[in-house]
Image (cartoon, helix red, strand yellow):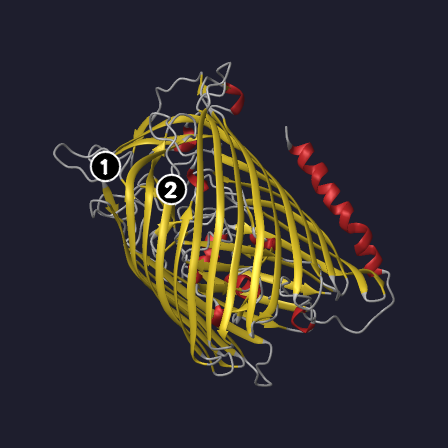
Amino acid sequence: SDAPLFRRLLASGLLLVTIPALSAQTAPSRPAPATAAEEAVVMSTFSVSSTQDKGYIATNASTVFKTNESLLEIPNAITVVTRDMITDIGSGKSSDVLQYAGVSNFFRGDSYALRGGRLGYALVDELPDVAQFADNIYVDSYEVIRGPAAVLYPTAVVGGLVLKTSRKPMSVAMHSASVRLDQYGLYRLELDSTGPVKQWGSAHLNYRVLGAYQDGDTYFKNVKDKVSAIHPSLQFVNNQTRVLLAFDAQRIEKPVFSKGLMQPNGELYTGAGRDEVNLDRGSNARFDLFNTRFQVQHSFSADWEMKTFLMQSFKRSTVTFLNTTAVDFTNNLVSYNAARGGDKFNDVSALLDFSGRYTLFGVENRSLVGFNIQNRVTIAPNGTTTKTRAWLNRALNAPHIETIDVPALSDYTEATGGSINESQNAAIYVQQTVHVVPERFSLVGGLTVRDLYANSAADRWVVPRVFTNSRLNKLVHRYGAVFQVIKGQVSVFAMESTTADPASTTQRDANGQLLPAPEGKGKEVGIKTNLADGRLTSTLTFYDIVRTNQSVFTGVGSGTTAVFAPIGSTKQRGWDADFAFRIFPNWQVVGTIYSGSVKDQTGAPVANAYDRSWSLFTRYDFDASNLKGLSIGGGAARISGRQVSTGGIVFPAGQALTLIKMKAGTMVTAFASYRFSKQWSARLSVDNVLDEVYAMGAQSAVFIDPSPPRSFAVSVRYDF
C-alpha cells in the first residue's frame, strides 16, 4: 500500500512547520494580529501580496506580464479571482470557482475552457502543473488570461490560460481553523497558520501551513469526494531578496470519470434516479500529488530585478472501475466492462527571468528576458481482468450496480500496451514594452524560440521499446499596442499572437498513432476602463482565432487510455467582456459574458465547444450598527450551446447523431455569513438554488458530471 508513504510525507511536512509554529507561539505577546490587507509586502514588480481581505476587485495583474502591471496597460483581457471570492464561492474545485470568471470545463476539477474551446492545465506560480484534480486550499488567486499568452507562458494555448498564485507566508501572525458540513454528510476541515519565525534587523523568516481534510457522504451513489492536503512553506525576506521553499502534498479520492448519461434530446438521463451515475462501489480513483517549489526573487535596484523558480511535481493515479461502453435508450440497456487504469507523471520545470525599466533617448522602456524549461515523463499502464463479463448488460432504468461483483485491483493482470512518453519543452523569450507617450501610448512586442521534443512508445512492454519521435522548432510572437483614450481611465488595445501547443504532443488516435502538435494564431481588439477611482473596471474584447492540428476526445480505449480524433483546423470568433464594480465600499459585483462560435474546417460545430456563457457574483457587507458583521451574497453562472460527442450511444436504425447539444442549466448559489466576534464567525450557503438538472462537466455523452440537487451547508470559523 502507498498509505505509509503518504503518511510519512505528511509527517515530514508537519515537522517542517512545527518548529516555526512553536517559535511563533512562544514569542512575546504582541498587539492583535493584522489582516492580510494591512501588511505591505510588495518588494518589487515581481512580487505579489496576498489578495485575502481585499475584496473582489483587482486593478493590477502580478503575473500576466511577469511584472506587476496595471490591467489598463496590458493588451489582454484579464480576470482576477481573489482569495476572498474563492472563500465566498466555497468550493475546493477550481472549475466550480472559475465558472464565475467566465471559464467553462471538460470535467469538474482542474479542467478549463475559454472562448468555447479547451485549455491546458493551469500554471502554479508560473510553472506548469500536472494535476487533473487539485484542491484549491493553497491558491491565493486565479488569473484568467483570455487570448494568447504563449510568448511568456510556453504551455498556453491560443484561447487563453489560467494562472494560480499560491498563498505565501506572511510576516504578521494569522491563524484560523474552520469546519464545514453539508446536508448529505460531507464535511470539510481547514487550517491556515502563518506568521514570523525569526527577525534579523530588516530581514525576517516567515512560515505558513495550510491544511484541508474532507470526507463523508455525497448525494450521488458510490461517489467519494475525499481530500487530504497539507501545504507547508518557509519564506526568507529582506529589502532586496525573497526566498521561498514550499511543499504540496494532496491525496484526492473520487471517481476517475463521472458517468452520468446524456440523452439524444440534450437532457440528462434520470430514469434510474437522479443520484445514479453508473459507478460501482469500488470505482473511486486515488490521485496523489506532490510538489516541491523553490523560488528566489532579487532586486538589484529599484528598476532591475531577477527571479528564478523551480518546481518538481509527481502525480500518480490508481483506479479500477466500470466503464460505460454502450447506452441503448431504445431497448433500455446499458453495457459495461471492467477496467484498470492509472498513470504517473514526473515533471521538472524551471524558469529564470530578468526585468528592467530604463529610459532610452528620452523614452521609457521596460524589458523582460528569460527562459523556461520543462521535462516530463508520463507512464500510462494497461490492464485486463480474469473475471467473467457475463453480467455487463443491465437495464438502463434499474442497473443495480451495487450488486455487481467488480474486480479488485489484484484481480487484474497487466497486459501488453500502456504508453510511455518522454517530452522536453524549452523556450527562450524576450518582451519589450515601449511607452512612446508616457501614460498614453505604448507598444508591446515579444518573441519566443520554442523547442518541443516528444519520445513516445505506444507499448511500454515491448523490448526493445519502439519509440516514435516528434520535434517542433517554432518561433512564437506577440505584438500589440495600448492607447489610453482618457489617461488612467479608458484604454483601447490591439494584439496579434501565435502559439505552438506542447500539451497535445502525446495525444493518440484510435490506432495508437501520435497526433501532430497544434498551433494557432489569435487577433483581438478591445477596450478597458478603470473608472470612479478604480471602483469600476471592465474589458470588452473582439477576437478571431485559428487553430491547426486539432483533435477531439472520442472516448476511452484499452484501460483508461484516452482516444482522440483529428479534425483539422478550427476557427473561434466572437466577443467577451468582464467587469468588477464596487458600487459602495461595502457592496461589490463582478461579472462576465461571452458569445462566440467554434467551427471546424468544414464549418461544422466542434465537440466539447460551447457558444455562450455569463456569470455574476456579488457580496454586500452590512455596516448598520444592529447588523454589523452580517454579509450576504451569491451568484449565478450559465454555459449554453455546449456540444458533446455521441460515442457510446446506440441509435435506432436509420438515426444517427455525431454531436448532442446539451440543455443548459444555471448554477445559482447564495450565502450569508455573520461575525460574532473577532474570533468567531459562521456561514450558511446554498448551492443550486434553482435545483436544476444539467451537466456541470461533459467529456462525451456517457461521461457527464451531473449537477447535484439543491444543497445546504453550514460552516464555522475560529480566528486566533
Give the SS element for disc 2.
loop
Name the residue rendered at 68%, 33% in the picture. 5
Q: Which corner quadrant of the image does residue 657 belong to?
A: top left
Name the residue rendered at 36%, 55% in the picture. 522
Which label's residue is closer to the chain start, 1 or 2?
1
Residue 463 visible in image: yes
Location of residue 278 with respect to 14 vertically, above or below? above
Location of residue 80 with respect to 4 vertically, above or below? below
Location of residue 473 with respect to 422 vertically, above or below? below
Type of amino acid at the residue the image marks with label 2: Pro
Q: Nearer the viewer, residue 366 or 16?
A: 366
Q: Which mark is residue 518?
A: 2
| Residue 93 x/y as whole percent | 50, 52
Q: Residue furthest left?
A: 654
| Residue 556 x/y as whole percent | 37, 32
Q: Which corner quadrant of the image does residue 314 belong to?
A: top right
Q: Nearer the viewer, residue 59 or 489?
A: 489
Residue hosting label 1: 329
Name the residue rendered at 61%, 68% in the picture. 358
| Residue 10 x/y as whole percent | 70, 42
Name the residue rendered at 26%, 35% in the picture. 649
How many residues crowd around disc 1 within 10 Å: few (fewer than 14), some, or many (20 or more)?
some
Q: Nearer the viewer, residue 112 or 278?
A: 112
Q: Quadrant of the N terminus?
A: top right
User: Does the CB distance between marks 1 and 2 fall below 8 Å?
Assistant: no
Q: Nearer the viewer, mark 1 or mark 2?
A: 2
Type of amino acid at the residue the image marks with label 1: Phe
Cα separation between marks 1 and 2: 36 Å
